[in-house]
């Protein structure tokens, strides 16, 4: 991101964040023999005596993947191994990670369901993470970020809303400190630096502390330490490059600027707050974009983290989370119900990508593979260890209210900026007000991203 990249895109297109906060995999467009390409992974002879379609009526002109996948999830819940094998055979014949939306959903969920049934979820997830690490570089990350922001507001929506709320909360202050807990590779901040540079009063000093949270010292979302060394080194290299470019851009904008990076291994709720170096004369903002759901939803950890925020006495906390309830249950009908919501959510996501990107886009393939990893983690790995378990806005709002925070109503000016952003993209995107706090980004009437602001 040279100066022209920062200035041009920050004023015209805005920078995105990643919906799945971890380094992204290769987008070569070629098929590799890994769990990301499970199509035809099973020999047809294994199920040659089965007639998979004999009692399942499907309309292949519609959303056939939903029908077969829900039948497969039900077979798992019923412990019906024969039925499961029939449906897996059918999915394997119909699915492809390079086809249409139904074929892709079939492929990625087939991978997850088979991993669940064979108790190989952790191994599959580790393999997928390892594949992604091999091609994690600043340039591939940068290219994907720029392309995603160009074609879709999925990521930029939250940036515009949060930056507007932060700027209003910092009005008149001369020393600013933002704690960025977002794994966004700082793509949010060029527009804010531009806004600070054009303030009518004296240009304030900005300190930006970025928390890069990695589980067990590895990649964000990594479930084991087996890939930690290479992953952490890759993330450190990326953050060092970003630090250099952010400092260079701040000098260009004439904004006094200090940049800190804290690499935190483990759950976010275990973050040592003393490392944040907060000064009494600083106006503090905490920015959480797409990372609160990475806190394990056990032992009140999410509530503990929000309570820890209050101890820091921030002027404002900005929160962006995807609007979904991705709690795939442990067993029985609880699993089927959770699986259904998971399938609904990823269909919306894949359909939005389908209408935003060209079919042959490498960046799109990177995003879909990242979603495939998340699907495996949600469906086939231990729920207590999940870093992908999203919660809907009303549940997050209850958590913040319970910890003593009050919602800040986003101003008309901020909302107008968000609407102006959406007009730059294809039809189908809209903004709606939340009944409790914040605003939603909706895709064809379905809320997909929630942005809100809070104060103690």
Image: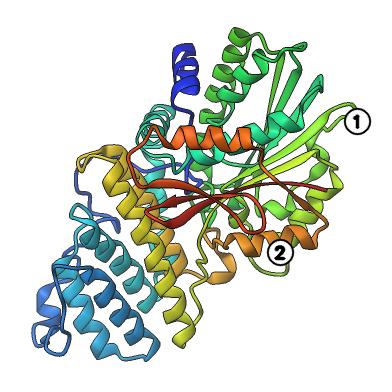
Quick one: label 2, few (<14), some, or many (20+) residues within 10 Å?
few
**Residue under label 2:** 398
Q: Where is residue 91 in the image (x, y as percent from the top left)?
A: 20, 71
Q: Up-down: is 31 above or below 175?
A: below
Left or right: 386, with 399 as reference point = left
Question: Where residue 325 sits in the image (x, y, percent)?
Answer: 52, 66
Quarter of the figure with residue 282:
top right
Q: Position of residue 13 (x, y in %)?
A: 44, 27
Snapshot quadrant of residue 113: bottom left
Q: Answer with left or right where residue 357 lies relative to residue 395.
A: left
- The residue identified by callout 1 is 280
Task: Find the residue positioned furthest to the front.
Answer: 412
Image quadrant where residue 261 sits: top right
User: Between 274 and 216, which is closer to the camera in this rendering?
Assistant: 274
**Do we see residue 45 in this rendering?**
yes
Q: In this view, does 291 lie to the left or right of 14?
A: right
């Amino acid at each position: 991101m040279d100066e022209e990249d920062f200035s041009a895109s920050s004023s015209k297109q805005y920078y995105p964040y990643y919906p799945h906060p971890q380094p992204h995999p290769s987008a070569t467009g070629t098929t590799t023999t890994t769990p990301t390409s499970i199509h035809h992974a099973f020999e047809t002879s294994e199920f040659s005596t089965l007639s998979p379609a004999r009692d399942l009526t499907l309309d292949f002109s519609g959303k056939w993947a939903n029908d077969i996948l829900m039948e497969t999830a039900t077979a798992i819940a019923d412990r019906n191994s024969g039925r499961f094998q029939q449906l897996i055979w059918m999915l394997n014949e119909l699915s492809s990670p390079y086809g249409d939306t139904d074929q892709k959903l079939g492929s990625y969920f087939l991978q997850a369901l088979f991993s669940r049934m064979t108790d190989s979820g952790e191994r599959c997830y580790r393999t997928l993470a390892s594949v992604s690490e091999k091609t994690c570089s600043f340039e591939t990350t940068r290219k994907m970020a720029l392309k995603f922001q160009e074609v879709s507001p999925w990521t930029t929506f939250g940036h515009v809303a949060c930056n507007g709320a932060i700027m209003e909360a910092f009005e008149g202050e001369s020393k600013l400190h933002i704690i960025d807990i977002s794994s966004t590779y700082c793509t949010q901040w060029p527009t804010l630096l531009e806004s600070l540079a054009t303030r009518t009063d004296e240009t304030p000093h900005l300190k930006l502390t970025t928390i890069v949270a990695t589980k067990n010292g590895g990649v964000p979302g990594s479930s084991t330490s087996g890939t930690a060394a290479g992953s952490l080194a890759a993330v450190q290299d990326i953050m060092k490059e970003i630090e250099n470019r952010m400092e260079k851009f701040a000098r260009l904008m004439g904004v006094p600027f200090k940049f800190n990076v804290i690499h935190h291994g483990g759950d976010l709720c275990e973050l040592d707050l003393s490392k944040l170096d907060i000064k009494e004369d600083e106006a503090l903002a905490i920015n959480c974009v797409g990372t609160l759901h990475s806190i394990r939803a056990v032992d009140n950890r999410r509530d503990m983290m929000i309570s820890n925020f209050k101890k820091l006495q921030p002027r404002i906390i900005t929160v962006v989370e995807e609007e979904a309830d991705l709690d795939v249950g442990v067993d029985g009908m609880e699993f089927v119900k959770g699986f259904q919501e998971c399938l609904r959510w990823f269909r919306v996501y894949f359909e939005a990508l389908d209408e935003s990107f060209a079919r042959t886009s490498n960046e799109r393939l990177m995003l879909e593979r990242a979603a495939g990893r998340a699907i495996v983690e949600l469906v086939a790995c231990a729920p207590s260890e999940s870093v992908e378990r999203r919660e809907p806005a009303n549940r997050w709002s209850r958590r913040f209210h319970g910890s003593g925070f009050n919602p800040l109503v986003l101003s008309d000016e901020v909302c107008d900026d968000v609407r102006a952003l959406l007009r730059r993209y294809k039809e189908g995107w809209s903004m709606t007000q939340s009944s409790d706090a914040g605003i939603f980004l909706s895709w064809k009437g379905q809320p997909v991203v929630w942005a809100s602001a809070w104060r103690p």
